[in-house]
Amino acid sequence: MPSFRAPRGTRDLLPDVWAGFARLEGIARSLSVRYGYREMEIPLFEQTSVFERGIGEATDVVEKELFRIAPRTEESESWALRPEATAGVVRAYVQHGMQTWPQPVKLTVVGPMFRYDRPQAGRYRQFYQWSAEAIGDAGPAVDAEVIEMGRRFYVEAGVPDVQVLLNSIGDSACRPAYLATLKSYFGGHEAELPELERRRLELNPLRLLDSKDPAMKALVAAAPKISDCLCEACQVHFAAVRAHLDAVGVEYRIEPTLVRGLDYYARTAFEFYRRGAEGQQQALGGGGRYDGLVELLGGRPTPAIGFALGLDRVLLTLEEVGAETAHETPPLAVVAGADPADTVSRLRVASLLRAEGLSVRAELATRKLGRQLETASKEHAHFAVIIGDELAEGNVQLKDLEAGTQRLVPLADLARELARAAKSHHHG
RNA sequence: GUGGCCUUAGCUCAACCGGCAGAGCAGCGGACUGUGGAUCCGCAGGUUACGGGUUCGACCCCCGUAGGCCACCCCA
C-alpha cells in the first residue's frame, strides 16, 4: 500500500476526469463572456476575518467548516482557505475602488474552494465552483439575468431536469418584523420542538422552516409565511424578478422555505436542484442578493447579487444519468518507426509537425512497429506516420488508422497533408 | 461534529465453518525481426488499508487508527 495518499476529502483529478472539469470551465467562461461577466482570480486564502465578517460568524461555513491555516507565530495573521468566492470578490471590489467603475461590476471566478467538513460523495474539502457576482445594481432585472445564466449553464452542460427554486426573504425593512412573528409562533410551541430546533429558535429562526425533522412538518406548514409579510418594496421587487424570468422563459418554483440566514442577505434567494435526485438533497448551485455585504467589508452601501455553481456535483450528476462528461482530445497522429532503435528520425519528424502546430505523439519507446501501431490505435490517434527506408528518398508512409489505408507522402508535404486531413476529420 | 455500513493486485471482484491468497480487465513481453483494437501463450503485480489482540493456525473473530460510502447537521 502507498504510504502517501491525497488528503482526506481531496482527490486527484486524473486526466480523463479533469477533461470533464475543463469542459465545464469552458462552458462557464463562454457564458461569462456572453453575459458580460469578466473573469478574475482572487487568492485561495484570506484573512480569516474576511470570511467571518463576510459570511457570518454564526454560519456553519465559518463556525465548523472553515479551513483554517495555523499561524506561524504568535503575532502572525490568521488565515483561512476560501470556502466560496463572494467574500473575497467583494473584498477586492472595495480594495480596488471598483465603485468608481461603471456599475454594476460583473465578475466571475472559476476555481477550487475549501471546506473542512466531513467528506461524502459530491462533498469534498477541495471542490470546484463557478461563481458570478453582479455588484452595484439593485434592480430586479439583474436578478433574473443571473438566474438565467445559471440555468443556461446546466442546459449547455447537459444536466437534465434542473429546477430553479426561488424565494424572497425580505429586506432590512420587513424581515425583522417577520423574524419576530416567526419566533413567537415557534416559541409558542417550544414544548413540541426537538432539541436541535430549539437551539435554532435562538440562533437562526429562519432555519426552522428548512427542518427535515418529520415531527416539524405540521408545525412548519402552519407557520407564518415570509411571502405574507414582505414589505411593499420587496413585493414589488419579487414580482418584477418573476416577470423578468417569465420573459426570458426560465421556469421556477416558489419555495417559501428556501432561506438565507444572515442579515445582509436580502430579497432574492434561489437554488438549483435536479428533479427527482433521490437520496441526495445536495444543491447543484445556489445564490441570492446580498445587499449589505459590501458595506460590511468596509465599502459604501452597495446592492449585489450572485451565485455559485458546484462543478463536482454537476459532473457527478452527469455520470449518474449516464451522460457524456468529456473526452480527451487524442493526438492527430503518432509518429512510428519501422526500425525500433531509430528514435532520432521519429523525434525529428515529430518536431517538424509540431512546429506546424499539429498535435502528434512521437513513439519513442524502442518497440517493434506492430506494438507502436497497437498503442496508436488504442489512444484513438487518427493517423500514423511510419518512418522506414523510404525516408532516404524523402518519403514517409501516412496511414489512416480508421480506414486502414496508407500512402506514400513526401516529407516536405506531410504537415500540409495532415493539416488538411485534420480539418476534414473534425468536420466529417 | 453525530450515528451506521464498508476496505483483498492499478481497476472490478473471488477465496467453504478459522486451514497453502486467486481470476477477469489493464500493463509489459512472445507467437508476428516493416503494419494496429482479434486470438493464444508467458511475465510482472500482495505486509489481504494500518496497528494490536484471540488462536496450533486469521483475508475471515475482537479492539483501535486511517480512508471511503450512507444518513444527519449544512451546503457546492
Image: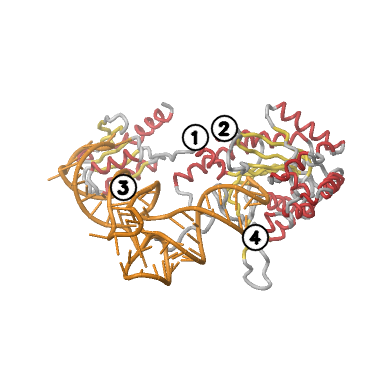
* Dots 1, 2 in contact, CB < 8 A: yes
Task: Compare marks 1 and 2 and give the one earlier in the sequence.
Answer: 2
* Label 3 vs 4, first from the N-terminus: 4
Say whether residue A320 is left or right of residue A167.
left
Please tell me in which quadrant of the rendered image residue A30 appears.
top right
- Report the disc number at residue A43: none
Q: What residue is pinned by disc 1?
A: A323
Q: What's the distance in space between the residues labelled 1 and 2, CA to CA?
A: 9 Å
Q: CA distance from mark 3 to mark 1?
A: 38 Å
Residue assigned mark 4: A80
Residue depth check, mark 1 versus mark 4: number of the one nearer the observer: 1
Q: Is residue A384 visible?
A: yes
Q: Nearer the viewer, residue A334 or A206?
A: A206
In three-dimensional space, the C-alpha distance between marks 1 and 4, rounded to whole angstroms, equals 36 Å
**Chain identity of mark 3:** A
Looking at this view, is A40 or A151 the one in front? A151
The quarter of the picture where the C terminus of chain A appears is top left
Between the residue at mark 2 and the residue at mark 4, the CA separation in whole angstroms equals 36 Å
Image location (x, y in percent) of residue A32: 63, 38
Do the residues at pointers 1 and 4 share their chain?
yes
Q: Residue at x 48, y 35 (%)?
A: A324
- Disc 4 marks a residue whose amino acid type is Ala
Q: Secondary structure at mark 1?
A: loop
Instruction: Give how far apart the Cα atoms at labels 3 and 4 are.
Output: 47 Å
The answer as to whether the residues below labels 1 and 2 share one chain is yes
Name the mark nearer the viewer: 3 or 4.
Answer: 4
Residue under numbered circle 3: A347
Of the residues shown, which amino acid type is indicated by label 3? Answer: Leu
Q: Residue at x 79, y 31 (%)?
A: A240
Q: Which residue is mark 2?
A: A160
- Residue A243 is situated, as x and y percent measured from the top left of the image, at 76, 28
The nearer-to-camera label among 2 and 3 is 2
